[in-house]
């Protein structure tokens, strides 16, 4: 499902398994949340986290097969869907409260809730020569919950938001860079993963205080944090 | 500390001296007093330029004055006091009945950057000087109105993130590219000349100051609310 590794100051969260789409279901979501809890418990000044994945997909969205497999009626399916969305909200909350800079190294396709997962990170980098970023909801006829809209409003500007959500675009690396969705793009199998690790290490070198970092992050994503009911703390004594 | 000069239709507010123009209760008091004067003398066609002498526009709150309290508790109280007292300066600039230009010939950091951003336009140097929110590096959180100002003035989400969460030191060209500054020029003289040109151009439009201020406040509703400004609707054209 996923694994957590520590290399110096860098935590590496890996979505494991080749030939799978790393679809988000309750199991994967709770393993990621557990991994983040562990990282938080072991965090110090100068920690950072990079999320990487195996195979052709970073994350292809929610596990809709799981929803239909466990449900015996439409009503039950809807309940499972709702439960899955609630878990995804908890995942967003876990990322936003992580007391260190975070980088998503998107090495393959990323769609729907997978995009939400990537955008939970402070920085997103992507592969140039393969993989698309795709908000598939419009094409699939599924609405987007308010919390995820707030995440988009917080992280993506103006007309790019419209192009991502209202236009069903399959966005390749170059385009994603131009549109300001990602920080940088890299070629090759390991390109994004290696660059993500390097970026994580560079951010770690700034030696920021994790508690301060989270509070500044929450201030930046004010509306989103309000919806997730996250309280703020004021730190008025410099932590040098 | 600071002086006010009137040149034709232009009000020129200058932070004097070669120091870092740190924002403390004395400077805040002076700024409020001068901005009051500007407001009282405003007419159609007025415009304000704020400039500073030396290597800094302003390097933020006077943390030395805060530390001089002698204890961590005392320092924290003094800092929070300055944070609160600066809100009326933002409010005064936000409600000033004329276009405003910040002419940055030096560095603007933390609350100094906020002071610059509280103006309608920033013109800065390309060859020297940075815009920098130092808080993440120093280990301080942002007051609510700092966040609101960034949210409502800087449209680019990644620029906001880079400035607040990454401690980016943004130079003139990048500031223009990312929509934080209006224009960047080489050299002090060029910045000042360009600021005067811009202020005069804006002044020539002869806008009704009251209407101008109301429209400006409407652009920044969250910020306006936080700094205690209310909104008035002007529905009779003032021609």
Image: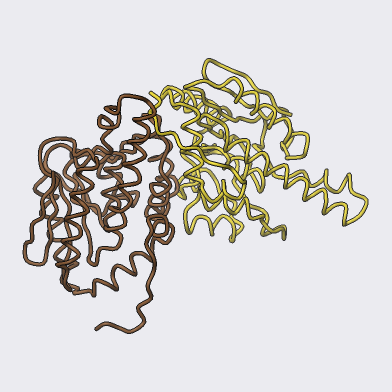
Chain colours: A yellow, B brown
Q: Identify the residue at image location x=35%, y=30%.
A: B74
Q: Is residue B223 above or below residue B166?
A: below
Can you give x and y, in whole percent of width and height, for residue A219 in the image?
48, 43
- In front here: B90 or B29? B29
Going 17% across and 74% down the picture, which residue do you hit? B44
Q: Residue at x 54, y 38 (%)?
A: A129
- Left or right of A2 in this view: A219: left
Which x, y percent locates residue B166? 41, 35
In screen coordinates, is B16 left or right of A152?
left
Compared to residue B21, the image places residue B208 above or below, namely below
Q: Is residue B142 above or below residue B71?
A: below
The image shows residue A10, relative to residue A26, as above or below, that is above
Q: Position of residue A112 (x, y in %)?
A: 66, 48
- Please state the horizontal and vertical placement of residue B142, each as a whole percent of the image: 41, 41
In percent of the image, x 12 and y 56: which residue is there?
B12
Q: Quadrant of residue B168?
A: top left
Give the position of the C terminus of chain A as an image quadrant: top left
Q: Is residue A202 visible?
A: yes
- Would you say residue B187 is visible in this rendering? no
Most extreme residue toward the right is: A72
């Amino acid at each position: 499902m996923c694994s957590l590794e520590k290399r110096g100051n860098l935590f590496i969260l890996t979505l494991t398994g080749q030939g799978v789409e790393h679809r988000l279901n309750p199991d994967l979501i709770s393993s990621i949340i557990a991994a983040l809890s562990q990282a938080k418990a072991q965090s110090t000044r100068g920690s950072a986290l990079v999320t990487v994945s195996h195979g052709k997909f970073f994350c292809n969205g929610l596990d809709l097969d799981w929803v239909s497999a466990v449900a015996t009626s439409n009503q039950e399916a809807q309940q499972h869907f709702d439960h899955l969305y609630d878990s995804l909200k908890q995942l967003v909350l876990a990322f936003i409260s992580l007391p260190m800079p975070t980088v998503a190294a998107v090495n393959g396709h990323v769609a729907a809730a997978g995009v939400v997962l990537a955008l939970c990170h402070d920085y997103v980098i992507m592969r140039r020569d393969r993989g698309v970023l795709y908000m598939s909801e419009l094409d699939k006829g599924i609405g987007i919950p308010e919390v995820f809209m707030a995440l988009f409003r917080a992280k993506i500007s103006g007309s790019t938001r419209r192009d991502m959500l209202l236009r069903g675009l399959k966005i390749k690396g170059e385009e994603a860079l131009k549109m300001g969705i990602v920080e940088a793009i890299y070629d090759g199998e390991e390109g994004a993963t290696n660059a993500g690790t390097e970026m994580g290490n560079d951010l770690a070198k700034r030696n920021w205080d994790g508690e301060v970092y989270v509070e500044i992050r929450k201030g930046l994503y004010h509306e989103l944090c309000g919806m997730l009911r996250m309280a703020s703390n004021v730190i008025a004594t410099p932590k040098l | 500390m600071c002086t006010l000069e009137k040149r034709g239709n232009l009000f020129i507010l200058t932070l004097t001296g070669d120091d870092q123009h740190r924002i403390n209760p004395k400077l805040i008091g002076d700024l409020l007093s001068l901005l009051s004067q500007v407001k009282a003398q405003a007419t159609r066609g007025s415009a304000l330029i704020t400039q500073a002498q030396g290597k800094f526009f302003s390097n933020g709150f006077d943390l030395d004055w805060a530390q001089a309290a002698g204890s961590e508790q005392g320092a924290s109280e003094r800092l929070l006091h300055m944070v609160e007292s600066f809100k009326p300066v933002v409010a005064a600039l936000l409600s000033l009945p004329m276009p405003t230009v910040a002419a940055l010939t030096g560095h603007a950091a933390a609350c100094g950057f906020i002071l610059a951003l509280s103006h309608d336009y920033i013109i800065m140097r390309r060859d020297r000087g940075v815009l920098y929110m130092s808080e993440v590096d120093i280990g301080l959180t942002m007051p609510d109105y700092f966040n609101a100002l960034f949210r409502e003035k800087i449209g680019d989400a990644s620029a906001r993130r880079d400035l607040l969460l990454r401690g980016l030191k943004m130079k003139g060209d990048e500031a223009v590219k990312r929509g934080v500054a209006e224009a960047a020029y080489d050299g002090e003289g060029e910045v000042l000349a360009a600021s005067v040109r811009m202020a005069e151009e804006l002044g020539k439009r002869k806008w009704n100051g009251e209407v101008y201020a109301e429209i400006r406040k409407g652009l920044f509703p969250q910020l306006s609310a936080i700094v205690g400004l209310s909104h008035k609707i002007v529905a009779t054209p003032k021609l």
